[in-house]
Image (spheres, rainbow, N blue to C red):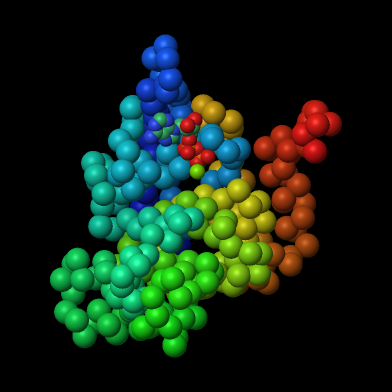
Amino acid sequence: MGSKVRIEFRRVWKRFPARGRGGGEVSAVEDVSLAVRDGEVVSIIGPSGCGKSTLLNMGAGLYLPSAGEVYVDGEPVAGPNPHVAFMLQKDLLLPWRSIRENVELGLEIRRVPAADRRARAVALIERCHLTGFESHYPHQLSGGMRQRAALARTLAVDPTVLLMDEPFSALDAQTKMVLQQDLAQTVAEEGKTALFITHDLVESIALSDRILVMSARPGRIVTEIPVSIPGREAPIRRRLDTRVGPLAARLMEELHIGEAMPAEAF
Ligand SMILES: Nc1ncnc2c1ncn2[C@@H]1O[C@H](COP(=O)(O)OP(=O)(O)O)[C@@H](O)[C@H]1O
Ligand SMILES: [Mg+2]
């Protein structure tokens, strides 16, 4: 892991105009500072609505902070950045393009020659276990396969920073584990840096070097927990480690899960 900071949030705040009558503002993110170093995978967990997606949108340059700054490779983020790839729960594949054409899209926009584009797409399609489906269209694939194609497309442009907003949360448990493995292997082999949002506590443990826990809205980072379990490149094996249970319990405690819950919540 390098010592170079790839993405950094410095005292970032984000407020939105409140919806409905009365005006005012909603404070979504408050005073968040974090830095992800080259080759690191950092997860963010926190209750629904605490500002996780808002944070990632600011990393991708889709929202600008109300205060504070975001930097990618030392440069302030002022808009979408070609070195940052964003992957969401929804695959956003173009329905009229084949899987290979979808994977090639970002390379086409960058005017990469056709032969190089195709070679890179085919290699990534193989890595993401979609060989044989290059000419299929998105509607012909299952949800898990579409998300694999979205992963291949995200990796195709060779981003330095991957921002992932619950990318596997709509998948069934087994498909999810296979995709986690594909992602972890690629990230390890290609030395990618990633900031990964999830509400799946074991997923955060399986995939990352560190976990940042956010409070309920307005979202602040309340604690940082290192994952000192070996094997980040092999999450299927890592999730079976005996240290995963106690670490998940610690995360539940940090998130106050199960505490003072009224009976009707169950
Ligand atoms: N574009 C927006 N306009 C107004 N409010 C927003 C917008 N995006 C997010 N919010 C508000 O900011 C808060 C945090 O949302 P979000 O970042 O989506 O949370 P999370 O991803 O943690 O569930 C929520 O109260 C949400 O309603
Ligand atoms: Mg979200």
The residue shown at (42%, 57%) is 87
The residue shown at (49%, 55%) is 89
x and y percent of residue 1 in the render? 45, 62
Left or right: 136 with respect to 245?
Answer: left
The reply to whether residue 4 is in sight is no
Q: Nearer the viewer, residue 2 or 34?
A: 34
Total number of numbered discs in the rendering: 0
Which residue in the rendered view is the most extreme toward the right?
263
Which residue in the rendered view is the most extreme toward the bottom?
132
The residue shown at (37%, 49%) is 7
Where 33 falls versus 153 (above or below)?
above
Which residue in the rendered view is the most extreme toward the top?
22
x and y percent of residue 231 in the render? 62, 69
x and y percent of residue 243 in the render? 75, 58
Q: Nearer the viewer, residue 53 or 246?
A: 53
Left or right: 175 with respect to 166?
Answer: right
Question: Residue 4 lies in what quarter of the image?
Answer: bottom left
Where 57 falls versus 67 (above or below)?
below
The residue shown at (24%, 70%) is 107
